[in-house]
Amino acid sequence: MEFSLSALIIVPTLAVVAPLLAGLVGRIARVHVVVFEILLGLLVGPSVLGWVPSNGFTTQIADFGLAFLFFMAGSETDFSAIKGRLAATALAGWLLSLIIGVSIGIAVGLSAVGGIIIGIALTSTALGTIMPMLRDAHEMSTPFGRAVIAVGAVGEFGPLVAISLFLSGRTTAGASVVLVAFVVISAIAVFAASRGRTASFYKLIASTLHTSTQLAVRIVVMIVAALAALSIALGLDMLLGAFTAGVICRVLLSGARPEHKELIETKLEAVSFGFLVPIFFINVGITFDLHALLSNGRALILLPIFVLFLLVVRGVPGGFAAPPGSRFADRLALVLFTATGLPIIVAVTAIGVDEKYLAPGTASALVGAGMLSVLLFPAIAMGQRSRARKAQRPHPGSG
C-alpha cells in the first residue's frame, strides 16, 4: 500500500481544524462540520494545493469510515417508530424517485447502465450525515425527526439494494437470489442477537466498559467487519453489510442497562465521528476530481442541474412523508434533508467510472452536486425547522 507521510500528519490535523472552524463560523451562520472537512480536504488535495496525494493509505481508512457511517445510521434507526403509514409513504416516495431518476439518468448518461447509476445516485439520502445534526438539535424523537429518519433509512437502504441488483455484474435473477441469501443470513444474525441478550452477556460487557478490554466496542467492530466481508464475498455492496451490522448491534445491545447502553453508544460515536468518519469526508475532498469538472463544459452545466434534480427527484417525493398538519417550513425542511446525498453518490459513481459506464466529468458533476447538497441543504433545513418550531410556540400571554 502506498504510504504518505503528509497524509499521516495533515489529515488528522484537518479533523481537528474542521470543528474549530465550524464553531467559529457558527456564531454567524449554521454550517455543519462536514462542510469544512470536505472543503479542507479539497484544499490540501491534488486539485488545489497538492499537499496530500490521493492514495490507498488514506482511501482504505476512509472506506472503513464510510462503513461506520452506515453502521451508525443502522444502529440509530428505530424501525419500530417508523412503521405503518410513515414507512409506506417513505418507500412509495423512494420508488417514485427511482423511476424518475433512472429515466433522467438514461437521458443524461446516454446508456441504460449509466442511467441506472445516475438514477441510483439521485435517489440517495445521506442519513448517516443527517442523523448527528438531528441528534444535536434534539429532533430524533419528534414527529419531524422520525419522518426524516424514515425517508433517510429508505434513501440509504434502497439504493444499496439497487446497486446489488443492477450493478453486481450478475443477471437480475442471479443478483436477486444472492440478495435473498444475504437477507436470510442477516435475519438469522438478528435472531441470534435477540437470543444472545442474556444477563451473563451484559454482565461481561459491563465489567469491561472501564478497562482496556472494551469488549463491547470490539464486538461491534467484529460484527461490522464480518457483515462487510459477507457482502463483499457475495458480490454485494459493502455498505449494505455495514448498515445491517448496525441493526444487529442495536438488537444485541438493546437489553443492556440504560447507563451502560448510553456509555457504549458514546464510545461508538467517539470511534466513528471522532476518528473514522471525518477521514472519509476529508478524503472526499482530497479525491474530488476538480480538473475533470472545470475542464468539461458539459460537466459544469450538469453540476447545477444535478443539484436541482436532487431536490426534485429525491426531495419532493420524500416531502410527502411529512407528519399530518405540518407547516410549509417543516415540509420544506424535510424536502431539503431528503435531498441531501453524498456517501452513496461517491460509492456508485466510483463503480460507474471504474467500469467505464460513466464519464469522469459526469461523475465529478454528480459528486459535486452531492457536496453542494451537504454544504447547503441541511443548514437551510435546520433554519426552516427552527422557524416552524418558533411558530408553534404559544405567544406570551396567549390562552
Image (cartoon, rainbow, N blue to C red):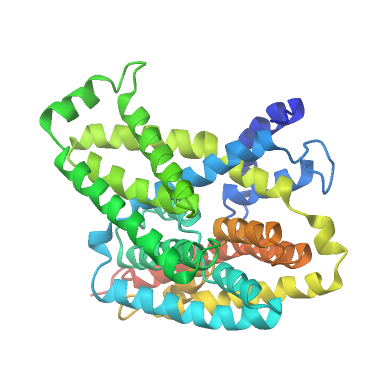
- Above or below — where is 19 with respect to 73? above
Q: Residue furthest left?
A: 199
Q: Is residue 269 left or right of residue 28?
A: left
**What residue lies at 79% left-to-right and 75% top-to-bottom?**
301
Residue 173 in the image: state x and y as whole percent. Answer: 43, 70
Q: Nearer the viewer, residue 157 or 370?
A: 157
Q: Residue 179: x, y in percent? A: 39, 60
Q: Nearer the viewer, residue 281 or 29?
A: 281
Q: Residue at x 47, y 38 (%)?
A: 272
Q: Mark yes or no: residue 136 visible.
A: no
The answer to whether residue 364 is above or below residue 58 is below
Q: Could one spot residue 220 in this view of the protein?
A: yes
User: Residue at horizontal 62%, vertical 82%?
Assistant: 104
Screen quadrant of the N terminus? top right
Question: Quarter of the image holding residue 204?
Answer: top left
The location of residue 46, given as percent across then percent down, is 82, 44
Outermost residue toward the top in this view: 212
Q: In the drawing, does residue 145 fall left or right of residue 196?
A: right
Q: Quadrant of residue 398?
A: bottom left
Quadrant that contains the C terminus = bottom left
Q: Position of residue 278 (x, y in %)?
A: 58, 41
